[in-house]
Image: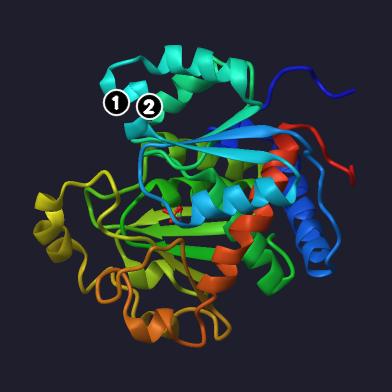
Amino acid sequence: MESEEKRDLITLQDITDEELMRILSLAAKLKEELRAGRPQRYLPGKIIALLFQRPSTRTRVSFEVAIRHLGGDAIFLPWQQLQLSRGETIADTARVLDRYVDAIVARVASHRTLIELAENTRVPVINALSDRFHPCQAIGDLLTIWERFGTLKGIKLAYVGDGTNVCNSLLLACTKAGMDISVACPTGYEPDPEAVKWAFDNAARTGSTVIITDDPLSAVKDAHVIYTDTFMSMHIPEAEREKRMRDFVPRYQVRPELFEAARPDAVFMHCLPAHRGEEVVAEVIDGPRSIVWDQAENRLHVQKAILMFVFKAVPWA
Ligand code: CP
C-alpha cells in the first residue's frame, strides 16, 4: 500500500534508486504515448503553482505544457509580483498556497527556501532549480542518455567545468542509476561537499565510480557523455565574470580535442542556456555529437512523470 505521506522532490536523495528508474520508465512511456497522439489526462483538475524567483525558459515551459497535457492547470507566480517581494515570509506564503493549490513547483535563489516551502505545506513541492540542486534537469538527462545508449548501468558521464547545481544533481542521478561519473573542475569550483558525500554513499550501494579531479583530460577518458554547464550561473555576480573566464577558459572549455580521449561514440550534453565561446565552442554544441535538443525535449516528458510520481498517479505500476 502507498504511504499517505506527501512526496517532495527537493533533491534526488528524496527518492529511492527504484523510484528514479520508475520515473524514467514512466517518462519514456509518456513520450511514446504523446507521439502516438493518445490523450494523457492523468491529473485532471490538479492546480499547480509555479513559483519562480529566477528566469527560466525550459523548466517553466515544459512544466506548464506537461501540466496542461495531463489535464491540470498551472498558475505562474513570479516572485516579484507576490507579497514575498515586500517581506511576507516564505513560511506564511507556503501556508497560504497550501490552501489553494495541489502542488508547488519552485525555482528559488536559496535552497533553504525550498526546504521551508516543503516544511510548511501538505502538498508536494518540486525543486525547479535552487542554487544547490536541479533534480528535474538530471532526471531528464538520464532519460536522454538511456535513449542514446540503451542502458544506464556502466555508462560514464564526464562533467567538465563549474561544479554547479546541475553538476551536484548529476552526481546523485548517475550514482543512483549505476553510472560512472567523473567531474573535472578548477580548484575552488568543486561540487557541493554534501552532494559529493551522497554520491559516494550511492556509489557504494550501486557499484558506480565517482571521480572528482582538476584534470579534464583524465575525466573524459573513455566517457560516453561529455557534459558542461555555464561558468556564470544565475547566482554568480557579474563582477566575477573576468576572473571566472581566466580560471575556466581554455582548459575547462569543451572543444573537439576533448572528444579524442572519450569513446568514439561519445556525445555532448548541456542543460542550456549555452554560451558559445565560454563553456563550449560552437563546433561542439552545433556539431554531430551534440544531443542538446533531445535533452531539452526530454524535460517535458520527465516533468510529467515527476508530477505523476508525486501525485501517486502512476498508471503502469
Ligand atoms: N536547463 C534549464 O533549467 O533551463 P531554464 O533555466 O531555461 O529553465
Q: Quadrant of the C terminus?
A: top right
Q: Is residue 166 left or right of residue 202?
A: left
Residue 144 location, quadrant: bottom right
Q: Is residue 87 above or below residue 13?
A: above
Seen from the viewer's position, the closer of residues 165 and 48 is: 48
Q: Is residue 20 above or below residue 112?
A: below
Amino acid bearing label 2: Leu
For the residues bearing labels 1 and 2, Cβ distance under 8 angstroms: yes
Q: Is residue 41 above or below residue 293?
A: above
Task: Tell me the crowding category of disc 2: few under 14, some 14 to 19, or many 20 or more residues within 10 angstroms, Cα based.
Answer: few
Amino acid bearing label 1: Ser
Q: Where is residue 220 shown, x and y percent of the image?
A: 44, 71
Q: Where is residue 95 shown, x and y percent of the image?
A: 52, 13
Q: Residue at x 75, y 40 (%)?
A: 308
Query: Callout 1: helix, strand or loop?
Result: helix
Task: Tell me the crowding category of disc 1: few under 14, some 14 to 19, or many 20 or more residues within 10 angstroms, Cα based.
Answer: few
Q: Residue at x 79, y 32 (%)?
A: 312
Q: Residue at x 68, y 72 (%)?
A: 149
Q: Regarding ligand 1, which quadrant of the image does it lie in?
A: bottom left
Q: Is residue 312 left or right of residue 185?
A: right
Specify whether residue 209 is in view: no
Q: Is mark 1 within 8 Å of ligand 1?
A: no
Q: Quadrant of the N terminus?
A: top right
Residue 82: give its label: 2
Query: Callout 2: helix, strand or loop?
Result: loop
Q: Where is residue 2 shown, x and y percent of the image?
A: 84, 24
Q: Residue at x 69, y 65 (%)?
A: 146
Can you identify the residue that label 1 sits on? 85
Seen from the viewer's position, the closer of residues 241 and 304 is: 304
